[in-house]
Image (spheres, rainbow, N blue to C red):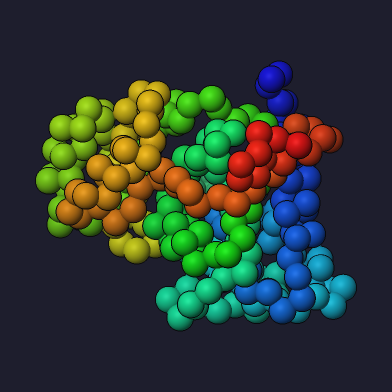
């Protein structure tokens, strides 16, 4: 697939996000993702609110919460919600089998909770995110600072080359006051098996492998939309 220019990529993100927001129904509880593509979905949702749609949003990060408040989207706190009707979030990589790699924006822990609570999980991407195998993008792993050394050693035992994430020369701290290790496992032959291994490390709060957590991926390639759904290769 030909690479998108930055302008086309922004348009594609917007198009995918707008298509996803059309799936939101009156009175839905909506999981609000994080990142530049999810941000377009927030704008499109606020446009629909102006047309009379009523929903409640559940933000997956402080950044998203701030944007949603500024756009006038009524919110429910993630920790108090038992079920979400539909969530809309981006991804850093996805495969046709709907395996995702997420967490580039550092919101993976709350994003995974939002996805886990959601009945309908919509992922919005431009075509640069489509891969045949996950792993060119490093796997973000959110870890408790108190377990930092232990977790880094365990990740190395699994064959990962780890790097603690920094921002402006200081350690990146998540909304949950944790650190993120970005882990290079190379191309991942069995993402589900690796996800299980990562889940078993004490001190790991979440990792960026989202397996079985997408209902539908809406991918825009410029002006065209391609939809990937469970048990379907694309339409
Ligand atoms: C944040 C995420 C984002 O969904 C992912 O990084 C994609 O972001 P963008 O839409 O800006 O490319 O997982 O933690």
Left or right, 210 with respect to 57, comes to: left
Residue 12 image point, x, y percent = 75, 38
At a point 31% along the width and 37% down the height, the residue shown is: 194
Residue 156 image point, x, y percent = 18, 32
Specify whether residue 87 is in view.
Answer: yes
Specify whether residue 171 is in view.
Answer: no
Task: Look at the image and tell me in which quarter the C terminus lies.
Answer: top right
Residue 195's image quarter?
A: top left
The one of 108 and 85 positioned closer to us in this rendering: 85
50 vs 60: above or below: below
Residue 53's image quarter?
A: bottom right
Left or right, 112 with respect to 179, comes to: right
At a point 59% along the width and 56% down the height, the residue shown is: 121
The one of 170 and 163 positioned closer to us in this rendering: 163
171 vs 233: above or below: below
At a point 75% along the width and 70% down the height, the residue shown is: 25
Residue 4 image point, x, y percent = 71, 26
Task: Look at the image and tell me in which quarter the N terminus lies.
Answer: top right
């Amino acid at each position: 697939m030909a690479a998108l220019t930055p302008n086309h990529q922004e348009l594609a993100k917007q198009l995918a996000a707008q298509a996803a927001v059309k799936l939101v129904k009156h009175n839905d509880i909506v999981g609000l993702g994080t990142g530049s593509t999810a941000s377009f979905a927030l704008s499109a949702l606020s446009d629909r609110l102006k047309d009379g749609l009523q929903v409640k949003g559940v933000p997956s990060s402080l950044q998203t919460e701030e944007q949603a408040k500024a756009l006038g989207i009524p919110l429910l706190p993630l920790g108090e919600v038992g079920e979400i009707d539909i969530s809309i979030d981006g991804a850093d990589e996805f495969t046709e089998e709907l395996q995702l790699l997420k967490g580039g924006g550092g919101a993976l822990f709350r994003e995974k909770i939002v996805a886990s609570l959601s009945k309908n999980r919509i992922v919005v991407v431009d075509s640069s995110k489509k891969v045949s195998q996950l792993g060119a993008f490093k796997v973000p792993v959110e870890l408790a600072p108190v377990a930092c050394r232990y977790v880094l050693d365990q990740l190395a035992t699994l064959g990962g080359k780890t790097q603690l994430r920094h921002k402006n020369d200081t350690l990146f701290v998540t909304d949950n006051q944790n650190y993120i290790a970005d882990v290079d496992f190379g191309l991942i032959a069995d993402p589900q098996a690796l996800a299980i291994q990562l889940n078993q490390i004490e001190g790991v709060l979440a990792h960026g492998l989202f397996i079985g957590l997408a209902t539908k991926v809406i991918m825009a390639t410029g002006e065209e939309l391609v939809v990937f759904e469970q048990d379907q290769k694309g339409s």
